[in-house]
Image (cartoon, helix red, strand yellow):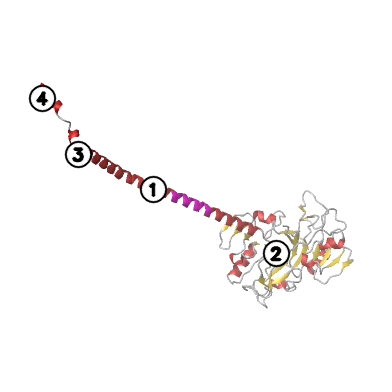
Amino acid sequence: MHRLLNASRSIVPYAEVFPSIVDCNRANHKDVNMKIIIRALVPIVLLAVALASCGRKEAEEKAAAEAAAATAAAAREAMIADALSAASPALAASAKIVDWEGNVLREGSGNYTCMPTPKAMLQNKSPMCMDMPWMTWADAWTNHKEFSIQTVGISYMLAGDDGASNIDPYAKGETPDNQWIVEGPHVMIVVPDAKILDGLPTDPKNGGPYVMWKGTPYAHVMVPVNVPPQDAVETPVGDALSAANNAMTATVKVVDWKGKVLRDGSGAYMCMPTPPDLLGGRSPMCMDQTWMAWANAWSKHKPFKADSLGVSYMLAGDGGASNIDPYAKGETPDNQWIVEGAHLMIIVPEPSWLENLPTDPKNGGPYVMWKGTPYAHIMVPVAR
């Protein structure tokens, strides 16, 4: 045993005899281990790359969706603002807003639907706000149909329009003979019977209301409402002219409440300064012939019936009146006293045409004053 042990001590170690073989085996083991590690890591790396790519794609898609949503929201708000620019502030507060494809942009609680400028007219502005008779009119015009309404309809275009032919409802642009007119702020009136418009002018340059598309099913009254400067009202003439459409002021006749002519004129309107016995505020007004007949009957407590549509201007506002009593001298707790800003007043031959219109002065849009009396008329607020 001792010999064997001594003999074993004398034997040279294997690694010293075959060093290259041992190193080779070690190297082979390292290569094998590395390959195993690499093979194990490749799927992990690929998965990480795929996850990172997927994450980037999701982030990009989310950012793109958020940008698209922001763009759509901005476009929506721009259309809403454009649509509401056609309305008076009080009307705008409650109006429903719809685009020309019928998409509701904003719900509303009032009697009006406002629409932004049609896409085909984006070089300028032509938003409008319509009541139900005008919505019926618009559907008929769009679809080349006949239509009928039972009450007066009033549409607002206080931002002006992009232009239209005064004689051709379907003209696409200006020609030498189609009376193309680009109108500033205005309202439009449609009535159940277009025959009552026969006595009104058709010339867009007359300074006041005129009939557009006369002789077609879509005939209506255009009423320009450019408010004149209010800085020269200390004289009776200046006060009277502050009630008029700006384009009318050069041609209107001015008369005081005693019938004295303060200035002659060649136009269809007569303007009168604030009545001298008015207790507060200003109430100048400009009247056509129908309204002059109305004013004469009212002042003398006589019966009155119009034979045509009449439009009166009070663009300087008024000093206040009862909404229910034509002869109220001042405010009482129950006479619905209302002080109105810039407005138009409309009288029609048939009281039944007023039946479905509001009588509440606070409804935001037109309303009937003195309903049930011979002096009933429509108040049309146009203050901006």
Q: For residue 363, what is the image quadrant?
A: bottom right
Residues at circles 1 and 3 in contact by the CB criterion of under 8 Å? no
Whether 62 is among the magenta residues is: yes
Q: CA distance from mark 4 to mark 1?
A: 63 Å
Residues at circles 2 and 1 in contact by the CB criterion of under 8 Å? no
Q: Amino acid at mark 1?
A: Val
**Residue that numbered label 4 is attached to:** 4
Q: CA distance from mark 2 to mark 3?
A: 105 Å
In terms of depth relative to the viewer, which is nearer, 218 or 56? 56
Residue 193 lies, in percent from the top left, at 68, 70
User: Where does the C terminus fall, quadrant-wise?
Assistant: bottom right
In terms of depth relative to the viewer, which is nearer, 56 or 238? 56
In the picture shown, does residue 312 fall above or below 319? below
Q: Which residues are magenta?
A: 56-67
Which comes before the other along the chain, label 1 or label 3? 3
Which comes before the other along the chain, label 2 or label 1? 1
**Residue that numbered label 3 is attached to:** 21
**Residue that numbered label 1 is attached to:** 49
Q: Amino acid at mark 2?
A: Val
Q: CA distance from mark 2 to mark 1?
A: 65 Å
Q: Is residue 203 left or right of residue 282?
A: left
Q: CA distance from mark 3 to mark 4?
A: 27 Å
